[in-house]
């Protein structure tokens, strides 16, 4: 599983009978029945369940248009395309993200530019963004990191002053709110992920949110080969429909088989958030005596989506490195994740863009020290106790 520890044969030293898989989702009876219903009806591809899932997510986010796709990566790619980004255009984003954020910009033919992050939130630092704006800058692509809102007022202000478009990477942020507005509805487009470790899941899956009907229509069209909108109706049972092909598009549509899971998961998004909040608060209380960094509290006018509980392990304070902690947890049969090694630490970006980690020192430091511990509504109280006990055993204090 992405982001989780390698589970090669390492001797275990704990009494846990099962491995605690990092980020394992909670799947319940209604979605299991819904998937079976799709299988029984032999309707696997895009159809009424994908449309219903779009309606439910749009209603939850309070946004008029939502386009279900097969991943957030696909959504980010289409978001860049529908905003008309061209070769040579620059998009400023964060080095503290999953590679997909940067890759989507490159796939759209534009040039990614990194700006360093805030040391407390891990989100884009608006002052660093301001310094990277050039005549070629056309868009900003903030990530609401770990579920904490990016500083959207400052970023939108920069965007307005410099005529930039804004795409919000909401892969961690379905529940995130910022000063009375929902993440993903503040910029031009917001993109959700329903990957297996996310706050609600469809296995693989994503969704583009927008208030703009033209952007929504073009996203939908480009996500299905570039076929005219009516082509979606060919997935119905009222006979053959002629369609046109208007652009050279992609095959990014979400299957009903995926939506069958999502349309029930979305009804529990708040209940799952409440469960993660209880786990989060317990971690905050019961890890407070360790010499580690804990997630910072967030302002009262924001809502954190509580996607990742990241601890910071400074080897000078802890007497142990992040990678050693990760391996020791693994030996105790507890999976953890790294979100993220900073983007410039990866070969391809160094080779292609000449980025150096030391030019983004905050992201580089977080990338070396950060560790995500399990935070899923699937966890029982005993699982949470095991994580806390294991960290107390592993980290000298
Ligand atoms: C910040 C961020 N952006 C984008 C993605 C890509 O999401 P997906 O796997 O749905 O394509 C992820 C997924 O891990 C992510 O964490």
Image: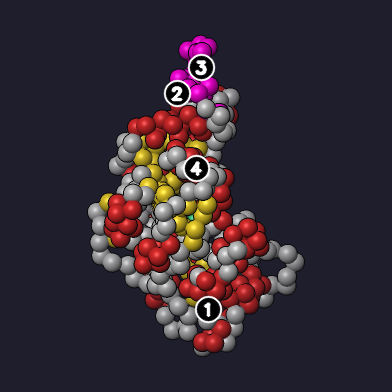
Q: Count numbered badges in the picture.
A: 4
The residue positioned farthest toward the right in the image shown: 9
Report whether the residue tagged 3 is closer than 8 Å to ligand 1.
no
User: What residue would you read off at disc 1?
Assistant: 313
Q: Residue at horizontal 44%, vertical 47%?
A: 192
Q: Tag 3, which secondary structure? A: loop
Give, as a single range, the part of the protein colored magenta: 225-246
Give whichever of discs 4 and 2 has the lower sequence position.
4
What label sits on residue 86 in the rendered view? Answer: 4
Contact between marks 1 and 4 (CB within 8 A): the answer is no
Q: How is the image coloured?
A: secondary structure
Q: Tag 2, which secondary structure? A: helix
User: What residue would you read off at disc 3?
Assistant: 243
Q: Residue at horizontal 47%, vertical 52%?
A: 90
Question: Left or right: where does residue 131 sit relative to residue 334?
Answer: left
The residue positioned farthest toward the front in the image shown: 135
Q: Quadrant of residue 18?
A: bottom right
Choose mark 4 or mark 2, whichever is in front: 4
Give whichever of discs 3 and 2 has the lower sequence position.
2
């Amino acid at each position: 599983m992405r982001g989780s520890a390698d589970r090669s044969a390492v001797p275990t030293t704990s009494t846990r009978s099962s491995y605690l898989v990092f980020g394992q989702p909670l799947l319940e009876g209604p979605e299991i029945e819904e998937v079976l219903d799709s299988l029984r009806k032999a309707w696997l591809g895009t159809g009424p369940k994908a449309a219903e899932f779009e309606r439910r997510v749009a209603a939850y986010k309070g946004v008029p248009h939502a386009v279900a796709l097969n991943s957030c990566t696909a959504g980010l790619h289409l978001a860049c395309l529908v905003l008309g980004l061209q070769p040579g255009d620059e998009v400023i984003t964060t080095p503290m993200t999953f590679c997909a954020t940067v890759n989507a910009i490159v796939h759209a033919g534009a040039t990614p530019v990194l700006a360093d992050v805030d040391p407390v939130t891990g989100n884009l630092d608006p002052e660093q963004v301001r310094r990277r704006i050039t005549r070629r800058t056309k868009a900003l692509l903030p990530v609401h990191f770990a579920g904490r809102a990016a500083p959207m007022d400052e970023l939108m202000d920069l965007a307005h002053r410099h005529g930039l478009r804004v795409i919000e990477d909401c892969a961690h942020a379905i529940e995130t709110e910022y000063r009375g507005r929902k993440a993903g509805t503040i910029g031009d487009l917001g993109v959700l992920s329903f990957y297996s470790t996310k706050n609600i899941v469809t296995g693989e899956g994503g969704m583009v949110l927008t208030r703009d009907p033209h952007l929504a229509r073009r996203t939908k069209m480009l996500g299905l080969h570039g076929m005219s909108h009516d082509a979606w109706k060919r997935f119905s049972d009222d006979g053959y429909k002629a369609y046109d092909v208007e652009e050279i598009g992609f095959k990014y549509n979400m299957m009903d088989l995926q939506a069958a899971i999502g349309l029930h998961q979305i009804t529990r998004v708040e209940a799952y958030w409440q469960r993660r909040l209880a786990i989060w608060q317990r971690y905050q209380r019961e890890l407070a005596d360790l010499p580690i960094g804990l997630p910072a509290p967030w302002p009262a006018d924001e809502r954190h989506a509580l996607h990742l509980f990241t601890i910071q392990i400074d080897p000078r304070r802890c007497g142990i490195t992040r990678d050693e902690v990760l391996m020791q947890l693994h030996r105790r049969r507890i999976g953890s994740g790294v979100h993220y090694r900073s983007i410039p630490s990866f070969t391809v970006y160094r080779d292609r863009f000449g980025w150096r980690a030391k030019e983004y020192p905050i992201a580089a430091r977080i990338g070396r020290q950060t560790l995500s511990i399990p935070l899923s509504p699937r966890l029982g109280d005993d699982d949470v106790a095991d994580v806390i006990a294991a960290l107390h055993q592993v980290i000298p204090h």
